[in-house]
Amino acid sequence: MVRSGLAIVVVCAGCAASLAKSPKPDAAVASAAVVEADEAPVEQLGGAYAVAGEVMEYEVQLRGITVGRVQVAVGDPGEVDGRHAIIVRSRGASAGVVALLGELSWEMTTTVDLDAGYALTEDEEFTAIVAGKRKHEHTDRTWARDEGHHNIHSAAGGLRGWRSQLGARVAADVHLGNATIPVELRDSDREMVGDKPAVRYDGIAADELSVSIWISDDVARVPLRVHCGTKFGDIQIELVGYELPRN
């Protein structure tokens, strides 16, 4: 369950970015001419967005109990095989009551094509130590740009880069390990999360899980909060730290 929670947060918080080419988002008020959700065409994720050098930290709760922490770090833009690319790294670990039962850790590093927004390479490790028994999994994958492959980092960056209006819908197939998770979201509202204006996206993942995501309605487009309903209980993911490089 911790691994599922960590995966969900990175879907919503990882960053792969078209920094210079992404237009500045409109900051606040949605258009009065709202397209009804059942009439709006379903868009596909395109170019993504993030801020080079940013670091985000999230707390993961299950049924109101802290179960994990996740850090997401974005590198500087560069080139891979002549294409603009960026590296995104995430690291998660068990916390709270789960840490008393065992040690769980998860890491993922993705190279993302900045122009298309798709994942090019992925390196993932998961380790669990429970009752003295250790389980370790490691995968290393590579995709061609024309495969149009989204993992949790590239999909999260694409959502950050989606310049939506109320009622607009977007869909993507997100790959996690050997599983393919269809996700569809709708631009539902403009709300405040603490002292920050936010866009709220509501939708369905894996055809059965209700998902809500809040992203700051400003230039940074930082994922602020995620709520996901599962058969094990509600997962709540909250931004608890955000840093930018001094330069």
Image (cartoon, rainbow, N blue to C red):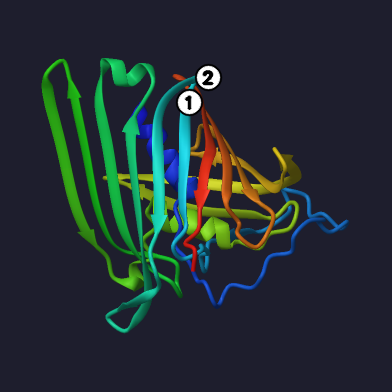
Picture disc at residue 99: none
The picture places residue 58, in percent across and down from the top left corner, at 47, 39
Tags 2 and 1 touching, CB below 8 Å:
yes
150 vs 12: above or below: below
Counting from the top left corner in percent of width and height, residue 29 is at: 82, 56
Find the residue positioned furthest to the left.
133
Q: Amino acid at mark 2?
A: Gly
Residue sitting at x 28%, y 45%: 107
> Which residue, given by chain and number where applicable, does mark 2 sit on?
64
Relative image position of residue 165 (x, y in whole percent): 73, 58
The amino acid marked with disc number 1 is Gln
> From the viewer's perspective, is residue 221 above or below residue 200?
below
Q: Please determine whether, in this image, residue 196 is positioned above or below residue 50.
A: above
Query: Which residue, given by chain and number where applicable, does mark 1 sit on?
Result: 61
**Alpha-carbon distance for marks 2 and 1?**
5 Å
Q: Residue furthest front?
A: 246
Residue 124 position within the rendered picture, expressed as x and y whole percent measured from the top left: 24, 48
Is residue 51 toward the left or the right of residue 83 in the image?
Answer: right
Question: At numbered mark 1, what does the secondary structure look like: helix, strand or loop?
Answer: strand
Residue shown at the point (46%, 55%) measured from the top left: 155
Circle 2 Cα neighbour tier, 10 Å, few/some/many (<14 / 14–19 / ≥20): few
> Does 136 sit left or right of 240 as displayed?
left
The secondary structure type at the circle numbered 2 is: loop
Quarter-wise, where is residue 82 in the image?
bottom left
Q: Residue at x 53, y 64 (%)?
A: 49
Which residue is rendered at x = 50% and y = 39% of the image? 205
Classify residue 193 as left or right of residue 211.
Answer: right
Image quadrant occupied by the N terminus: top left
Extreme-right residue of the structure:
32
Front residue of 44 and 89: 89
